[in-house]
Image (cartoon, rainbow, N blue to C red):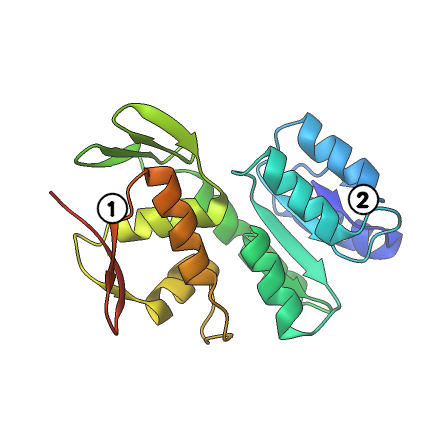
Amino acid sequence: MLIEDDDGVARLIARALSRDGHVVERAGTGEEGLRYATGEDFDLVLLDLMLPGLHGSAVLAELIRRRPHQRIIVLSAVPEVGTRVACLEAGAADFVSKPFALAELLARVRARLRDRAPGPAADSVVIGPICLDLALHRVAVDGHWTALSYREFLLLRHLMESGGRACDRSELLHAVWGMTFDPGSNVVDVTVRRLRAKLDHPDRIETVRHVGYRFATP
């Protein structure tokens, strides 16, 4: 799903994606894009921020609220780091600044689509009473399921698959948010707090002083 109001840019992106083997639906306003994106299942949503009517940030927030598992790549000419961080914290899977090279955009699309499907060897990660569903992005505690946002899912999966090893914030920022720098944000700590609430126990994810976090193993 491509939500972009600039017809020239939209046609350019759509052609490139089609040549790369993707089927593309288009919308030109925030309201139209939100309606389509919540009414059908899309592997990926490309979302411009500067949209007529409903702003892209509002579309992002509402789409994540209704479909917390949805992969969204934000496209924006707004260069500020704060805007990129805000979109990633809100649940976007990636952020691509305009102007961009089509080759880079296609590479990021492929990367996010690879994130979508778990490997054939397993469809869940289980540690003690915690079961993480890799396909549906939800977690169960003693059989009671709770939906996870995209970032919550990536963070919990990384911690659970780290074998009880302590993961520092730089590692988590890179693995979950794709950041190679510390934006001075507490996004890791905020997401850990949300996960702890969903796991219904503050000690499921342990704080390792002066390091970061680790998943508690039985």
- Quadrant where the N terminus sits is top right
Horizontal and vertical percent position of residue 89: 55, 57
Q: Nearer the viewer, residue 90 or 134?
A: 90
**What residue sits 78% from the left and 54% below the top?**
12
**What residue sits 56% from the left and 50% below the top?**
91
Indicate which label's residue lies in the foreground, 2 or 1: 1
Residue 136 shows in this picture: no
Horizontal and vertical percent position of residue 62: 68, 41
Residue 30 badge: 2
Three-letter amino acid code at disc 1? Arg
**Which type of secondary structure does the marked residue at label 2 adopt?**
helix
The residue singled out by tag 1 in the image is 204
Q: In the rendered image of this protein, does residue 177 appear above or below residue 71?
A: below
Q: Give the class, few, some or many, for how many residues have Cα within 10 Å of label 2's Cα (few <14, many ≥20).
A: many
Say left or right for 47 vs 176.
Answer: right
Three-letter amino acid code at disc 2? Gly
Q: In the rendered image of this protein, does residue 28 appear above or below residue 107?
A: above
In the image as oriented, which residue stretches furthest toward the top? 143
Q: In the rendered image of this protein, does residue 167 appear above or below residue 139?
A: below
Question: Which quadrant of the structure image shows residue 130?
Answer: top left
* Sequence-first tag of 2 and 1: 2
Q: Give the class, few, some or many, for how many residues have Cα within 10 Å of label 1's Cα (few <14, many ≥20).
A: some
Horizontal and vertical percent position of residue 5: 85, 51
In the image as oriented, which residue stretches furthest toward the left? 218
Horizontal and vertical percent position of residue 185: 50, 70
Q: CA distance from mark 2 to mark 1?
A: 39 Å
**What residue sits 74% from the left and 37% below the top?**
34
Q: Nearer the viewer, residue 44 or 208?
A: 208
**Which type of secondary structure does the marked residue at label 1 adopt?**
loop
Say left or right for 155 vs 205.
Answer: right
